[in-house]
Every structure is written in structure tokens, then in C-alpha cells.
Image (cartoon, coloured by chain):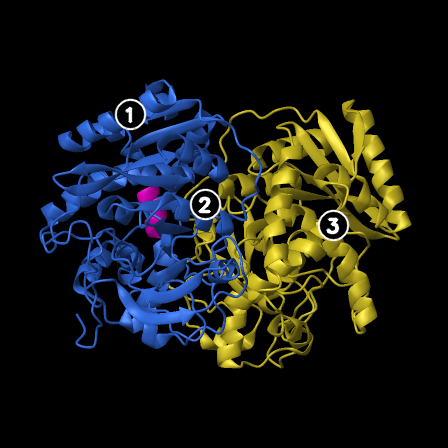
Chain colours: A blue, B yellow
């Protein structure tokens, strides 16, 4: 951690006070901005001091920032991102580990760690952040916040640093559903038209089964409450029933998305690292070793398989279908505990098995802070078909709010 | 034009011979790569010597390049792009004007000018290029080639320079439909599943009406042939019937896409130009003046309208619907004739009125080289719903091949 790093408790890198540019749906709301999204006049670090020092400050805000300022919100700070946003744990070598407000001895999750901390610790009502492999959803789950990853490319990425172009999205973390809903509607340019009633709610059985037993119990209780309150009959589905008997849920990640993400990361940040040889943090440099030696030609078949999974998963979704599952299979790891390969794998493997479902299928997903295990939060995720973001927001409001 | 510029007739910047990495669907085919798409070990110029000199050569090919090499194709060259790909005419201040093989006294169209010239002049069977406002479709139309812009973000943009993230796509120009079809299927990771028969063919009446009279006549004849050959009854539709009576077709551009494109371009290339103050070519610097002074906050309502148009236009498309119209309203302008504001507007305004339809609605579009006016080519475009790229390829094969 840098000597000059500010207090990392709220994940703040730079306090700001950017006033709203117009009145609108977000009047009175304060937001922070993850440090891979441009703010005019401030260098964007991408979670890396080396990147920050090598790239001049942008002249324009990212378009998504201007959408929020143009709808009445006030920007109160730039917040920590994991190094190159290539992590799900939220422990930054350079900027410290932002505080998980509801489980202070545990990691906040990443890569939108500062976003989660700034909202969880009361600095902001919501945070503008990004998700590819789970960087909105995992901190939402581990910090007990609302989080939404929209359909791939529904929200403009102009002014957001390129990461994994076929997977990355702009998203939001918020303390209340109403705030998440309002911020997402602005970013989505959502129409006020009605959407179907959520009539078919499927539990993704494979995702539930890889969760810890206590998480499974909590999910069951939450689903029972939803069924009781709404009268919707829950159904169960296995991944193999969606895409074919030869695939288990972990195929989304292991036989598809992981390779697409690695190949795309080689082309964005990887090219820069190979040419500029910047200083890298210890944890990231370990992970990057696998990126450097990755054989993208051998990966082409898995990359093509992502498109099959996309088509098959989306064919399963009718306009009134919601799929749900625990956002993460576990509560947050204790801070500093991810210090062996075994501990890292134990966190990442089952987590990415779940998060890859929406990733590979380009789906909108909302993590709702509905579960508690050992006093720590876990999210319950709701997913709808590609580009059915407005339906998903309305469905979650109807089912759990 | 630079003293050191190579012969621009085929649009070649750098002759290459990158052998296929595996056998596949593209065995025996040669392709070129537009100079905003990374080739490992070669600096990517973005059509700008200043950009080229400021950015080191990438270590990895763009993922789309590797997809083609991994499917049996051979890369034979890097070819000219208009400066920052921000043009539709194909006259490059720095790299010369590539030759329009079928109308040598006329411009090739841009920004994929070198791609069109390399295919039209026999250097390659197809070219890997990009399209936002029409950069594949316009050169296809003006040079008499096949061209396809896919659905937004169906093809990975990893290793393609960021331009207008909500509009830009990777596409292909080819000399024969079979080649276009094969190259696009590889890039799309297209499944071999069947698609609907194209039962409803709508002519977009507003687009036809802004075309030159001779182009209109050619379109009518081509459509009559299609109807005679296939037995499909053609229908007519006005833009106002799709999105509401208050909008004419030019609203796609003037009240929506143009502002989204300008705001996004500010965030990508614009930031770099403002900070680095590079040398700019005369024509681009004129156009960039409007980008520099553009008020992105005042544009937010138009940017939100793009999402409405997207939804409304796509609601019109059933799985078996194709919409068609002339790709461009005119044949190519004579080389050197775009030297007054009036001449520039006369080319760009009606062209972008048409190209913005697919742009704002994120649609796949194929330009087919079916029309000839005064001995010069014009394309006939076919469009399908968002993510129905495989259907569109099959439909065009059935209708016109």
C-alpha cells in the first residue's frame, strides 16, 4: 500500500463535488465513480498507479457520468478499483482494502470494491461501476447491497477504459432498490412502457448446489417467502436442460467465458503491459502470468462456444421468465485470508461458475441483499433475457420489494 | 499525401503474408485488415500518422484477426483507413485515395476505403474492417462489393481501436457473396442451425424517396426481379409507421444517432486529441471543429431517443422480416469534388439519413452489389432484426443469389 494512500475505509481516492447539470429523476442523490471510468480533469488509474501516471487526465467525463449529472445526481468522489479491475476480491495492493460495512473483518469483493465501500459506509447513495466477470455482483453480494449488471452494451462505454469488450458492462451499486432502479433507468434510457408480469421463476439448481449449505438454506427460505407473497409457483431447472446434457454449469466458465475474457484482456491491458512493462502489484502479477502465456488460438473453439451458450440460454428465456440463484456461493472471505492458491481457488472457482451464467449469455442480473449467513450478507440474484432490463427491474420490484 | 506513401491504388499500407494458423472454412482465401484493427508487431495508425507514431505496436492480433487466421484464411496486408475512421468518403490526406476499381474517377467511399480497394482491385478476397456510421456499407455500395455490418457487438472488438462504443462494429467487405458469408460465419461463431424463410420483405419508402431518380428506378427493377424469382410479395413501410407519426427517417440521424456518435467520439479519440494536440489532416480538422465544440449535455435527450428508436424499430421486426432500401442514395462522388461545404453536405446528409437506420437500431445490414447507374455501382441493402445475423445471411442468399 502506498504511503500516500488516503483512508481506504470508504474506498475514496479523491473526494469531489460535481454538481448536477440538470434536474431530473436523481435529484438529491449522491454517487461515486469507480476509477476505471473517466472524470474530466482527473487521471483515471484503472487501479494501477503505473497506468495512472502513464495516461493524461481526460478532458470529458464518461458519457455515463454525464447521464447521471444530467439527471440531477451529484458526484461526490472517485473510488478504488482492483488493479486493472482484474479481480473479484477487493484487496488492493496499492490503494488498500475498502471496508465492508456489514462485515468489517471480511473483504468487500471486487473489482468494484471502492464503489461498494462508498455506498455501504454512507458516503454515497449509489456508485457507478463496471462488471465483466462479476465486479458489480460480487461486491453487492458480499457487502449486502443492491447491484445490477445490465445487458451487455445497453449502456454506453464511452469514457470507460476498455477491458473485455464482449463481456464488460457499466453497472450500479446502491443502498436501496429505489435508488438502483432510478439510476439504472437513467443509464438505460429506459422507456416508461409496461413490461410483462414475471410469471415463470426458475431456480438454477446447479448454482444452488455449489453454494454452502447455510446459503442454500437461506435461499430456500427467501424463495418460499417470494412464493407465499406473490403466488408465483417456483420451478427448478438444471443448466443441462437449457444447453444440452453434455454440459454442467461450470462449462459456462471453464469451456467458454474464461477463455474469451483472457483473450480480450490480452488485447486491451495485456498489450500495454507487454510494451510498457509497468510495475504490477503482487497479486495481479501472479494472475497476469496466466494471461501472458495464454494460447488464444487454442482458445478459439471455447470462444465460439460462448456464442452457442448465448443463443441456447436466451432461447430458454420467455419475455416473462426470471431465473434466480445465489449471487455468490459463500459469504465474504476474511481479509488477508486469500494468501494461498487453495484459498484463492476456493473463492474464485465456485463464484465464477455462477457469475459466468449471465456473463456468457449477456444477460441483465440484479443482486438483491436478501440473505444473511453467520451475520454476513449474501445476495440473491435475479436474471432476465438479453435486453429485457426494464422487465427485470419491474420483476424484482414486484417479487421482493 | 506523405512522400513515403506507397501506391495507394489497392489501399495497401503494408504488404503482409500471415499464414493460416489452422485449417477451416476459409481455406485458400486471402484477406486484408483495416488499419484500425491490431496486427501483432505492426503499429496501428487509425488513419493518422500522429496516432501511429504515438502508440507502440501491439503484441497481439485483434481477436477477429485470429479468428480468421484460425479458420484457414491468409492475411495479405494492412490497408488504409480514413483519418480516425471519421469519414464516409475515402479521400485520405495522408495515405492517398484508394482506387475505386469499378469507377476509377470516383471516390471509393470510407472509412474502409483501403478495404474496398484491396478487394475491388484483386489483392484480397475479403477485408476485415469496421462500420459505425456506414464505413463498411458505403464503400460496399460505391465500389460494387458485398459488405456486411453485423448486429452491434456480435463480433469481439478486442484489439480494435475504440471509436463509438454504442455504434461501432467489426464487418467484412468481399467480392462474392459466398466469401462474405463464410467470413462472417467465422466471425459471428454462427451456429449451423436453420433460420426462418424470409416471408415479409418491406421496402423502406422514405429511404427510396431520398435516392436519386435513377437509383430509385434501379431499386424498383431489382425488387421486381426478387419478387418474380422468389414469389415473395413486397410490402412498403414508412419510418413514421415504425416509430410514430412525429418522426421522419432523418430523425434517426439528426435527432438521435449523430449526437450519440459525436459524444462517444469525444470520449475516445477526442480526449486524445485535446491532450496531445497531434497534427490533423485538413478535412478531418474541419470536421473535428464540430466535435470539439459539441455540447454533450444538451445532447442527452437525443442520446436517450436512440434507445427509443432501437426498441421501436426492433419491435417491427418479426423473425422472418427483412427491410430493404438503397445502401446509398447516389453513386460515388467524383474524386476531389467534395471541396465545398455544399458538396460535402450533398453527399453526407442523405447518405447518413439512410445509414443511421441500422446504426440506431443496432441491426445487421448487408449491402448487395445489385444496382448500376451511369456505369457506376450502388448497393441494395437488406436488414434484419437485432442479433438475427444468421437469418439475414440466409435470407440474402435465398432472395438474390
Q: Residue B345 appears at what percent x and percent y?
A: 79, 65
Q: Which residue is mark 3?
A: B354
**Residue B46 placement, left or right of B213:** left
The subunit carrying tag 1 is A
Magenta stretch secondary structure, dominant: helix
Quadrant in which the C terminus of chain A appears: top left
Give yes or no for contact between labels 2 and 1 (Cβ–Cβ under 8 Å): no
Give yes or no for contact between labels 3 and 1 (Cβ–Cβ under 8 Å): no
Numbered tag placed on residue A225 in the rendering:
1
Residue A4 versus residue B70: which sits nearer the camera? A4
Q: Which residue is mark 2?
A: A152
| Vertical placement of residue B122 versus A238, above or below | below
Residue at 79% over, 51% down = B377
Q: Earlier in the sequence, mark 2 or mark 1?
A: 2
Q: Residue A342 appears at what percent x and percent y?
A: 10, 46
Considering every residue shown, the one lying at the far front of the view is A28
User: Mark 2 against mark 3, which lies toward the viewer?
Assistant: 2
**Magenta stretch contains residue A181:** no
The subunit carrying tag 3 is B
| Vertical placement of residue B41 versus B387, above or below | below
Q: Which residues are magenta?
A: A253-263
Same subunit: marks 2 and 1: yes
Same subunit: marks 3 and 1: no
The subunit carrying tag 2 is A
Quarter of the image where one finds residue A252: top left
* Callout 1 secondary element: helix
**Magenta stretch contains residue A256:** yes
Amino acid at each position: 500500500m502506498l504511503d500516500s494512500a488516503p483512508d481506504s475505509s470508504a474506498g475514496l481516492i479523491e473526494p469531489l463535488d460535481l454538481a448536477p447539470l440538470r434536474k431530473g429523476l436523481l435529484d438529491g442523490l449522491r454517487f461515486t465513480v469507480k476509477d476505471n471510468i473517466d472524470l474530466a480533469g482527473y487521471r483515471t488509474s484503472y487501479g494501477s498507479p503505473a497506468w495512472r501516471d502513464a495516461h493524461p487526465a481526460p478532458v470529458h467525463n464518461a458519457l455515463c457520468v454525464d447521464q447521471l449529472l444530467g439527471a440531477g445526481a451529484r458526484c461526490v468522489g472517485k473510488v478504488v478499483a482492483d488493479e486493472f479491475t482484474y479481480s473479484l476480491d477487493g484487496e488492493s495492493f496499492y490503494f488498500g482494502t475498502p471496508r465492508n460495512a456489514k462485515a468489517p473483518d471480511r473483504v468487500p469483493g471486487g473489482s468494484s470494491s471502492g464503489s461498494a465501500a462508498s455506498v455501504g459506509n454512507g458516503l454515497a447513495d449509489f456508485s457507478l461501476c463496471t462488471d465483466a466477470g462479476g465486479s458489480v455482483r460480487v461486491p453487492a453480494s458480499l457487502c449486502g447491497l443492491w447491484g445490477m449488471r445490465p445487458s451487455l452494451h445497453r449502456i454506453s462505454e464511452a469514457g470507460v477504459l476498455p477491458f473485455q469488450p464482449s463481456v464488460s458492462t457499466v453497472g450500479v451499486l446502491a443502498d436501496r432498490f429505489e435508488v438502483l432502479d432510478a439510476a439504472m433507468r437513467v443509464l438505460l434510457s429506459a422507456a416508461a412502457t409496461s413490461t410483462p408480469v414475471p410469471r415463470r421463476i426458475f431456480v438454477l439448481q446447479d448454482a444452488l448446489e455449489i453454494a454452502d449449505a447455510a446459503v442454500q438454506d437461506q435461499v430456500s427460505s427467501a424463495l418460499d417467502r417470494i412464493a407465499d407473497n406473490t403466488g408465483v409457483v417456483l420451478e427448478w431447472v438444471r443448466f443441462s436442460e437449457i444447453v444440452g446434457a453434455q454440459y454442467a454449469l461450470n462449462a459456462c466458465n471453464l469451456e467458454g467465458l474464461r477463455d474469451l475474457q483472457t483473450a480480450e484482456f490480452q488485447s486491451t491491458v495485456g498489450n500495454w503491459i507487454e510494451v510498457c512493462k509497468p510495475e504490477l502489484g503482487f497479486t495481479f502479477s501472479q494472475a497476469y502470468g496466466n494471461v501472458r502465456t495464454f494460447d488464444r488460438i487454442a482458445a478459439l473453439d471455447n470462444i465460439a462456444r460462448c456464442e452457442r451458450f448465448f443463443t441456447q440460454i436466451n432461447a430458454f428465456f420467455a419475455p416473462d421468465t426470471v431465473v434466480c440463484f445465489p449471487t455468490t456461493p459463500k459469504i465474504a472471505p476474511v481479509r488477508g485470508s486469500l494468501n494461498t492458491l487453495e484459498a484463492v481457488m476456493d473463492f474464485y472457482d465456485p463464484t465464477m461458475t455462477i457469475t459466468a451464467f449471465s456473463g456468457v449469455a449477456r444477460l441483465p442480473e440484479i443482486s438483491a441483499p436478501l440473505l444473511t449467513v453467520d451475520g454476513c450478507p449474501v445476495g440473491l440474484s435475479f436474471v432476465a433475457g438479453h435486453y429485457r432490463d426494464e422487465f427485470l427491474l419491474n420483476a424484482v420490484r414486484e417479487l421482493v420489494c
